[in-house]
Amino acid sequence: LAQGVGLVQGTPFRLIPARPQRNEDGWRRGVEDHESSSAAIFKVGGRMSELLRKYVGSKRDPPPWRDVRFRCAFHNTIYDVLKARGFRETDSELDWDFFWADKEWIHEFMDHVHLRPHQKVNHFRNHYELTRKDLMVKNIKRAQRQAQKDGLSEEAQKYEACSPQTFGLPMEYSMFVEEFKKRQPEGAIWIMKPIGKSQGKGIFLFDKLSEISNWRQVPLFQRNQAEKEQQQNRRASAEKEEEDQSDLPEPYIVQRYLSKPLLVGGKKFDLRLYVLVTSYAPLSVYMYRSGFARLSHARFSMDAADLSDVQIHLTNVAIQKHNENYDEKRGGKWELHSLKQYLLAKDHDPDKVHRLFWEIQDVILYSLMAVQKVIIQDKHCFELYGYDIMISDDLKPWLIEVNASPSLTANTPSDYDMKFALLDDMLTVLDFEKYLVGTELQIGGFDVLYRNGARVGPTAASTHESYLGCNNNRLQQLEKMARQYGAEQDERTAPSSAPAGSSAAPPTGTAAASSVVGGGGRPPAQPTRRERPDSCKADFSVGPAPSGPPAWRDARAAAAVGTVR
């Protein structure tokens, strides 16, 4: 440690100086003296997977990670992961391989820069088509209408089941009033959400139309006139602009409130899940096995007197941390795997629980397919979405919202562990070091959910319909994959043992195929999953591969096209 070098699970790594930081919850990740700083980063090294580097990358000259340059707009967990992987930080505007940008940079500069083929940035240009509440609902409704028009009634029902009944205000105020009056005898409760805010800001519940009178629809000619006046005032003075804007209602969405949510210990919760989209054309989706439930710290109640209590009805950490019963040790979060085990152990039918997690993935897939044609595809872009899912007491999932920039700031050590592993696996999927083949079904904690126009998941023989919430065996899977790829690399680089000028015919058979130098054997076996009925774990196994020139990877990838179903 004094020399800045450590050994984690037999893997050498170099310590990286930690930056003292304090997040919004006051939990200190950094340290002030050298000794505690080294200890903190040694723990980080233990969390990180060094397996591909150990078995594959360390045998290359130069090591591939040293050539990767990154730029990062945030100094939180993503910054720690990039430094721990050995990438080089740069302040250059465009001379980087990977840029973890904020959304403002995407909106202001993305259309005005020319990126080289290898460069990657963490947002699509119009990501807001899915992550802005009103546009998400608009795109889902449009996809539903198109499915109905095409006679795909089952698909239309899938789109309809994505989210609760929703209207955009003030534009759809009159439509909402009709629905409100229709549902009023049932005692329906509605929830108002601003379209462009997060962390529970501006959200409130209501059961009377008089409470939202400010959002009454204004006639079109008056709206146009107000917009013109607003533009003129914007040029004239910032103060005047604020005055005029206060006269116009802020855009909101109104949704039918889920009055019978599934409760844990009498308290409401929602799920935060992570989805990686590497391409929209074709659609390529990875689902992370881990996630967490965010719990409220007050018992759930639908009494009229409690409708205004946000600590009962909203699970956002930014709101719950002000509750007098807030648990700083756990941060109001519960691991997804633990929640799934709790549901299976409770009185719920196991088949219904497994079906629930399958339907959660349905909601995610159909929301992505709803925007597939409107998102601007760019090979330089990817997106790590944070999905918020609510579950009703009949075990039905509902999509609440999708976050383009899910919080990566940890408020507990276990939260940091999970997010560090998530981001480490994300960078492995993006494969800047060129370790992967491209046909893998599991990479660390990420499972392929959709690829080549087909959904991917456990086989029919498995007792589980989804890997979501199962045991995250990321380190075991990465080690198995790294050892296999390392052995294949060693075979390709090993000198031939055949004497010079030998004209002996190449051997045949399975064993021989893996010993042929320069190709000539059968294509390597494809990655497969071995299903274990008594376990949630998914193994990664790769059959023997020929030791040939580097082009073997292209042949292997080509042979795998059409095999995933």
Image (spheres, rainbow, N blue to C red):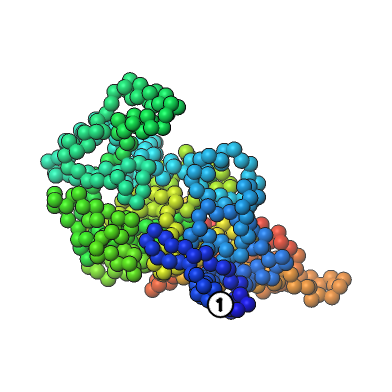
Location of the N terminus (image quadrant) = bottom right
Depth check: give the residue in front, 11 or 510: 11
Residue 377 picture quarter: top right
Q: Position of residue 161 (x, y in %)?
A: 31, 47
Q: Label 1: which residue? A: 8
Q: What residue sits 79% from the left and 70% below the top?
A: 505
Measured along the vertical axis of the image, is residue 79 above or below residue 126? below
Q: Position of residue 237 (x, y in %)?
A: 42, 29
Measured along the vertical axis of the image, is residue 411 above or below residue 360? below
Residue 8 appears left or right of 469: right
Q: Position of residue 276 (x, y in %)?
A: 48, 54
Q: What residue sits 33% from the left and 36% below the top?
A: 251
Q: Which element carries disc 1, helix, strand or loop?
A: strand
Q: How many marks can you see?
A: 1
Determine crowd level at label 1: few under 14, some 14-19, many 20+ residues with C-alpha closer than 10 A.
some
Residue 323 picture quarter: bottom left
